[in-house]
Amino acid sequence: MGDRLISDLTHAYTRMATTQQQISTGRRVNQPSDDPLAAGQERLRTSDLAGIQASQASVATATSWLTASETGLSSINDVLARARELALQGANGSTDQNGRNSIATEIDQLIKSTKDAMNTKFGDAYVFSGTASDVAPYSAATGDAYQGDTNAVIREAGTAATLQANPSFVPAGGSTAQPLSALTVLGGGTAAGDGRVLDTLETLAANLRSGNLSALQTTDLQRLDANQQAVNSARASVGAMLNRATAATSRLEDLEDLTKNGIDDLTGVDLAKALTDFTAQQSAYQAALKVGAQVIQPSLLDFLR
């Protein structure tokens, strides 16, 4: 009877200790032996959760990249709008040559502003350099020569889903869509003769200094309009990709919640039930101690020993 009592008390105490651990940790499965099947499924779900969280980080990076791109393109749009105002002013016959020279000087500063806008960085990455994001698109040493590449910047956004951080658009003077970069927006200047922002602004400054009213009144304005249209197209592509990124973020958050709930269903503990069980187990344990004390009474011989 004594051996059996000790065995039963040990089992009761073990159950009570297990329930207490479940309450304190909030988990029903604290080691694989508690439920091998649930523990194995939890490992699979945890791996899925890690993948989802990695995708969330990737989408967040793409979103920040796209936001930085929108900021840079907005600056280019403002420069082009100001350049158009100056072109109209210079094309006015009432403006003398000294006035045109002053306007050309301001255009020179606008050209520098466009390069500054295209040298926008997100963290340590230049967002308009394609995949060569460790290199500034333009520098004082290289002039109008673009230093990056025109590769697509792809970010993972979940299972079989990707986002292009530099979405494609049709650049000025082009006929096919190309990934967004400083080259597809600004181009390579008059040396390249590509009709993009640098070429257009540098040609405008030259025509102002030479007093070429015919070019100022026709060609220059047309090229400015074409570049504004291209920049607006690029901004529209960025906006559409930002919408996709927002949708991906929402989808991944839902998946994360579902996965966490699945893990909790597998290994989590019903706190109310566990508290009730612990109270019952504690009462049973105390009752077993009391009964055991009554069944096995010490005798005088026990004390003499």
Image (cartoon, grey):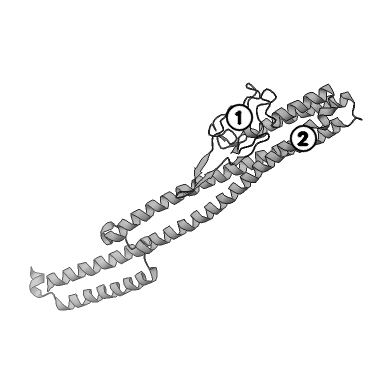
The numbered dot on residue 137 is: 1
- Residue 305, given in percent of the width and then of the height, sits at 7, 68
Crowd class of label 2 (few under 14; some 14 to 19; many from 20; radius 10 Å)? some
- Residue 158, given in percent of the width and then of the height, sits at 47, 50
> From this viewpoint, which residue is outermost toward the front?
175
Q: Is residue 219 left or right of residue 73?
A: right
Q: Is residue 162 left or right of residue 138?
A: left
> From this viewpoint, which residue is outermost toward the right?
94
- The residue depicted at 59 percent of the width and 51 percent of the height is 243
Rounded to the nearest whole Å, what is the CA distance between mark 2 and mark 1? 26 Å
Q: Is residue 208 left or right of residue 142?
A: right
Q: Quadrant of residue 19?
A: bottom left
Looking at the rendering, in which quadrant would you find the N terminus? bottom left
Q: Which residue is mark 2?
A: 222
Amino acid type of disc 2?
Gln
Amino acid type of disc 1?
Pro
